[in-house]
Image: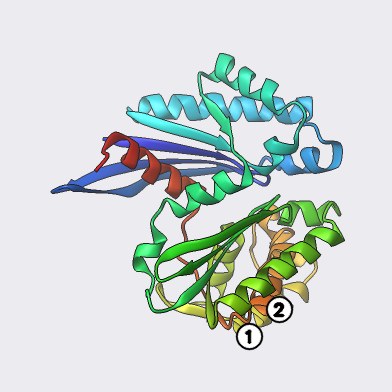
Amino acid sequence: MRYAAIDIGSNAVRLLIADIKQNGKTFSFKKNTLIRVPLRLGDDAFLDQEISAKKIEELLKTMVAFRNLIDVYKVSDYMACATSAMREAVNGSSIVSLIKSEAGIDLEIVEGQREANIIYASHIEESLDRKKNYLYIDVGGGSTELSVFSKGEMIASRSFNLGGIRILDNQDKDETWAEMKEWVKHQAQANKNLSGIGTGGNINRLFKMADQKDGTAVTFLKLKSLYDYLNSFSLKDRINVLGLNQDRADVIIPASEIYLSVMKWGGVKQIFVPRVGLVDGIIQLLIDKNFPE
């Protein structure tokens, strides 16, 4: 049995096809195929509040290709979600209709809190130390989702319109930074000794660059050192010398600034990077829907 997850983000569009495994009464999944297409819808949405005709054409071609792959892989269920860029585009709903008619894919534009809830559906809390408090930080192209876990339960959550693409396009607002700082500081006062959990493509790349073993945490100082190292290179050299993909080489700097800022405000000294994201949460939601307890 296979399920598919589609994530239409502000920086990239992803398709995950996963094989579903059953062990007794429990179900898990193994990633079969992951495809990422860097469409950068956020550049249109955050600057013009509208997805351009060129980007719509590229997105539609991508969705038709994804539909064909879903059929070829004989996927039995799927779910497609669009996040920050499509939320802000005035023509978002018409694009949803176009994708339905031309690609045969039902697409849901999810609000910030719904996006956070889908990510957390991957049940990361099950692997947490229930004696500790955690600040969950997910940085995307257009938004940052923050949540606090205590005793294995989520006790607070907020979505902020701050992301890597939004900052690159100078569309971040001082008042949003201030709101996020105030929220994080309040949570840190109420929940002492926060450890961090980071998700998103940029923190995954930073974790890889840190040469950490899976399951270990990256310290704030190590993350800051990596940020300073990356920032010492020009964009061109981050691509040609460090080997970063073009669509990662620019956005990793502002994304790092968000992670570091949140960690600093929250007094977070280390961050775990489980390398999961929205597509993982979608697959888990599909399992929960098809195999309810």
Question: In the rendered image, which residue does mark 1 sit on?
Answer: 221
Task: Categorize mark 2 by other alpha carbons within 10 Å: few (<14), some (14-19), many (20+).
Answer: few
The image shows residue 219 at horizontal and vertical percentages of: 56, 82
The image shows residue 45 at horizontal and vertical percentages of: 78, 38
Task: Categorize mark 1 by other alpha carbons within 10 Å: few (<14), some (14-19), many (20+).
Answer: few
Observer-nearest residue: 72 or 196? 196
Observer-nearest residue: 227 or 125? 125
Observer-nearest residue: 56 or 273? 273
Badge 2 marks a residue whose secondary structure is helix
- Disc number for residue 229: 2
Q: Which residue is found at the position 79% from the left and 29% from the top?
A: 52
First reached walking from the N terminus: tag 2 or tag 1? 1
Say which quadrant the C terminus sits in: top left
The image shows residue 166 at horizontal and vertical percentages of: 78, 52
Farthest residue toward the front? Answer: 190
Farthest residue toward the left? Answer: 24
User: In screen coordinates, is 3 left or right of 251?
Assistant: left
Say above or below: 18 vs 127: above
The image shows residue 1 at horizontal and vertical percentages of: 26, 35
Badge 1 marks a residue whose secondary structure is helix
Q: Which residue is found at the position 48% from the left and 78% from the top?
A: 217
- Mark 2 or 1, closer to the camera: 1
Question: Spatial distance from mark 2 to mark 1, Cα to Cα?
Answer: 12 Å
Question: In which quadrant of the rendered view does residue 157 lie?
Answer: bottom right
